[in-house]
Image (cartoon, rainbow, N blue to C red):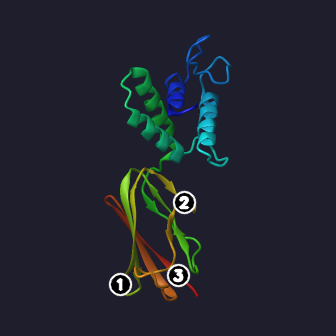
Amino acid sequence: MIDVDDLVLVASHFGTRAVRRANPNPDVNNDGFINREDLLLVADALESEEDIPAAPALTAANLQRWILEAKQRNLGDKTFQRGIAVLEQFLTPFCPKETTLLPNYPNPFNPETWIPYQLAKPASVTLHIYAVDGTLVRTLALGHQPAGVYQRRSRAAYWDGRNTLGESVASGLYFYTLTAGDFTATRKMMIRK
């Protein structure tokens, strides 16, 4: 059974030469070096264990999930902690440098749209949708989100074109405001029926 401990084991020995007959063996592909290929093999095995369709193994979301799982195990030994630190270093290139609200898509839309954003640091995220006269139409509480890019449909905020009561809104111009920690930004969108 492959689990996050295996990923942490490989990460804790990352960049080193393999020790022959080590048990457990972090050199997954047995090429004599513990490197990115070994991490990818373990990550791929973790994904197949979780029945995740073929997707890039070392994504920010996967790394964040595995780091959280490893931290929850709270093993105090130094090798395990070094493995977590290496995984966190791999996460750095995936994180945006600044929090940004991106344009919704499609725009104009009917009846639904996705609202992408990027978080430079973890934050509680809320999206408010306003009519052109400033009336609050809908609030989407997205919860506490880790740093990362929320751009794909599976991760971006989703609005179904309905108000708080579940009624379809009228055609016209609307504004959406993203609040993430101390960051706030507003953009406009158009619904056409």
Q: Going by the image, does 42 lie left or right of 160?
A: right
Q: Are marks 3 and 2 in contact (CB under 8 Å)?
A: no
Q: Position of residue 102 (x, y in %)?
A: 50, 65
186 to 110, vertically: above or below: above
Mark positioned earlier in the residue sequence (3 or 2): 2
Mark positioned earlier in the residue sequence (1 or 3): 1
Between residue 2 and residue 178, name the one nearer to us: 2
- SS of the residue under disc 3: strand
The Cα–Cα distance between marks 1 and 3, rounded to whole angstroms, is 16 Å
Residue matched to label 1: 135
Mark positioned earlier in the residue sequence (1 or 2): 1
Which image quadrant for residue 21? top right
Q: Position of residue 74 (x, y in %)?
A: 37, 31
**Where does the N terminus fall, quadrant-wise?**
top right
The Cα–Cα distance between marks 3 and 2, rounded to whole angstroms, is 19 Å
Q: Amino acid at mark 2?
A: Gln
Residue at the image position 33 percent from the left and 58 percent from the top: 181
Which image quadrant for residue 36? top right
Which residue, as the protein is rendered here, is positioned at the far left?
182
**Label number found at residue 151:** 2
**Where does the C terminus fall, quadrant-wise?**
bottom right
- SS of the residue under disc 2: loop
Q: Going by the image, does 179 lie left or right of 189?
A: left
Q: Are marks 1 and 2 in contact (CB under 8 Å)?
A: no
**Label number found at residue 190:** 3
Decide: few, some or many residues near mark 2? Use Cα within 10 Å; few <14, some 14-19, many ≥20. some
Q: Position of residue 168 (x, y in %)?
A: 49, 85
Residue at the image position 48 percent from the left and 84 percent from the top: 173
